[in-house]
Amino acid sequence: MKTAMIGDNCIDVYVRINGEVVNRRYPTGNCVDTGVNLQKLGIPTAIISTTGSDEDGKWMIEALTNEGLDISHLKVGNGATAITYMDMNGNDRVHGDYIEGVLENIVFDEEDIAFAASHDLVHTALWGKAEDTLPAIKAAGCKAISFDYADRLDHPLVESTLPYVDYGFYSYHKDRDEFIENFLKDKVDRGMKIAVATFGEKGSLAYDGKEFTSFGIFPAPNVVNTVGAGDSFISGFLYGVLNGLSMKECLSKGAEVSAQVVQVFEPWVTE
């Protein structure tokens, strides 16, 4: 059992925390965070992406290598690693400039697609620039594809990727209501195996074509940084799927991993 993450990687740089200049940084990206957390859960994971030829790119490679991920398809492009600058006020993040770097021209070739399809599950996300690979990955026999749509429920990729996605994840900023229930049901009725909505501190909801299943959260007494909460939830949920757990157990595992991650500054538990 093994997974492949195809898409983005970047460095998050916090310029200020509560007004204090800090220049605190870490390697991240949806595929990186989800992949590292899956690896920590015991699922062998590969990263398919392109990082920069600068010091940040070297750091990315070193960090993923130290975490035990397969980086055989992590290419090095000639240029800068993607960077997101932000400030933090309490637990609220204020996003600043984004420098796309080598991701601007990222290309996934036939070898990347064949490599991805050889895994039990392939995961990507809204800004991973890998959506065009999904038809070929699916056609090559990939057993399952998951996609993180973040909170962009009306994004064009929600519709265009639907025929290829088995597990869809959506962040919803309201409580459970008729809209989100109908939204999840629609996605499964039209092809997904499971559609999941997360409500932050109010838990999660999944639909599998038969019934809705909900789950709350695990206590997080010392919330430090909520960046990575969604990615870590996805890691826990997919761990459950890959291990044949029930829907409730999948949601529970997602909530458990997410609660661990929000209590550290980085988007994965480092110890």
Image (cartoon, grey):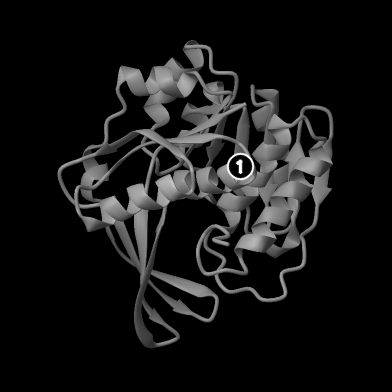
Q: Which of 93 and 270 is in front in this view?
A: 270
At mark 1, the secondary structure is strand
Vertical arrangement, residue 148 with respect to residue 19, above or below: above
Amino acid type, mark 1: Phe
Residue at image position (81%, 48%) is 214
Residue, far left:
78
Q: Which of 103 and 117 is in front in this view?
A: 117
Vertical arrangement, residue 264 with respect to residue 148, above or below: below
Q: Is residue 146 left or right of residue 21?
A: right
Residue 89 placement (x, y as % from top left): 48, 81
Residue 210 placement (x, y as % from top left): 83, 28
Q: Is residue 135 visible from the viewing direction of this image?
A: yes
Residue 187 placement (x, y as % from top left): 65, 31
Q: Is residue 82 visible from the viewing direction of this image?
A: no
Q: Nearer the viewer, residue 40 or 255?
A: 40
The quadrant holding residue 228 is: bottom right
User: What crowding class fits label 1: few (fewer than 14 Cα within 10 Å), some (14-19), or many (20 or more)?
Assistant: many
The quadrant holding residue 49 is: top left
Q: Is residue 8 left or right of residue 247?
A: left
Q: Is residue 4 left or right of residue 224?
A: left
Residue 63 placement (x, y as % from top left): 40, 52
Q: Quadrant of the N terminus?
A: top right
Q: Quadrant of the C terminus?
A: bottom right
Vertical arrangement, residue 150 with respect to residue 207, above or below: below
Residue at image position (42%, 21%) is 115
Q: Which of 234 and 44 is in front in this view?
A: 44
**What residue does disc 1 label?**
169
Residue at image position (68%, 38%) is 239
